[in-house]
Image (spheres, rainbow, N blue to C red):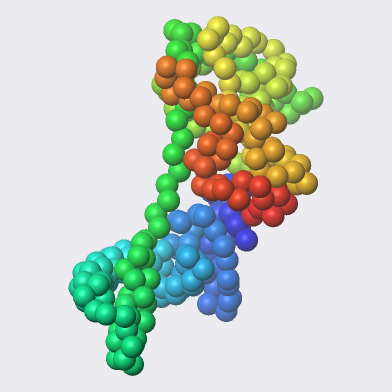
Amino acid sequence: DEPTNHLDVEMIEWLEEYLSQPSITLFMVTHDRYFMENICDQIFELEGQTFYQHPGNFSSFLERKAEREEISATNTDKARNLMRKELEWIRRQPKARGTKSKARIDAFHDLKDKASHRVKDEKLELDIKMTRLGSKILELHRLRKSYGDLKIVDGFDYTFKRKERVGVIGKNGVGKSTFLRLLTGEEEPTGGKIVTGETIEFGFYTQRGIQLDEDKRVIEVVKEIAEYIPIGKKGRNITASQMLERFLFEGDHQYTYVSKLS
C-alpha cells in the first residue's frame, strides 16, 4: 500500500530492483506511475464500481484505457441515435397490448439506460486568491543550523526571487525538512539571519499532513477553519460546502465522518 511514500530516489531504485525478482508475486496500490511502469505487468483499474484488467505496464494501460473510452463513447452515440428512432415509434403507437410491442418497449428502456451512459471525468477546480508580492521575498544571510556536532547548514546565503521554484533534494535524514522549518520560522537558526518580505505569507504543507479529528464530519472540519473562503478577484467568496464540491465531495459525501475516508 503506497510503498514509495517517504522513500528517497536511491531507496526507490533499490525497491524496484528487489520487487522485480521473478520469484515474487506482488499486489500493490500506488500513485507513483513511474514505479508502476517499471514493476507491474498487470494493471487493475477500479472505476464506476467496475474492475477493468489491463495486461502490461502503466503505459500500456493508458493506451488501452483510451481505446476503451473511445469505444464506449461510440457505442453511447449509436445507442442515442437508435433511442431517438424507437422513441418516435413509441409515440406513434397506441398503448401496447401485444407481446411484441411490450418487448420492444422493454428493449427501449434498456437502450435508454445505455444511451445515458457517460464517461465520468471529474476534475478538481480550485481558484486561489493571490496577494501582491513585494520586491523582497526571502533572504538568507550566513544561515547556520546545527544540533551539537551535527551541522545541517553552515554559512548558507541565498535570495529567493519572485515566481521562483526551488526544489531541495538529498538523502533521508540529511535535514531537508529542518531546512524548510527554518525558512518558515518553525525552527530557530543557530546563527545567521533570515529576512522575510513584508507581504509574504507562508503556506507550508508538511509530510506529516494535517491531523484531523476522525469523529467529525468533513464539512465540520472545513467550517472550523472558515465558513466562507475568499477566491479569485473582486472579493468573491464561496461557502465551505462549495469549496468541498471543488474537491469532488458532493452532497451527502460532505457529511461523511473523517474516519471513513481513505
> In the rendered image, is residue 78 in sight?
no
- Percent of width and height locating residue 114: 35, 72
Quadrant (top left, top right, bottom left, bottom right) of the C terminus: bottom right
Q: Exactly how many numbered labels are in the figure?
A: 0
Residue 15 vertical placement versus 7 (above, below): below
The front one of 148 and 136 is 136
The front one of 106 and 125 is 106
* Outermost residue to the bottom: 99
- Percent of width and height locating residue 84: 23, 69
* Outermost residue to the front: 94
Q: Is residue 78 left or right of residue 243?
A: left
Q: Is residue 28 left or right of residue 70?
A: right
The structure residue drawn at horizontal position 72% and vertical position 41%, both measured from the top left corner, is 212
- Percent of width and height locating residue 89: 22, 76
Residue 105 vertical placement versus 40 (above, below): below
The front one of 200 and 171 is 200
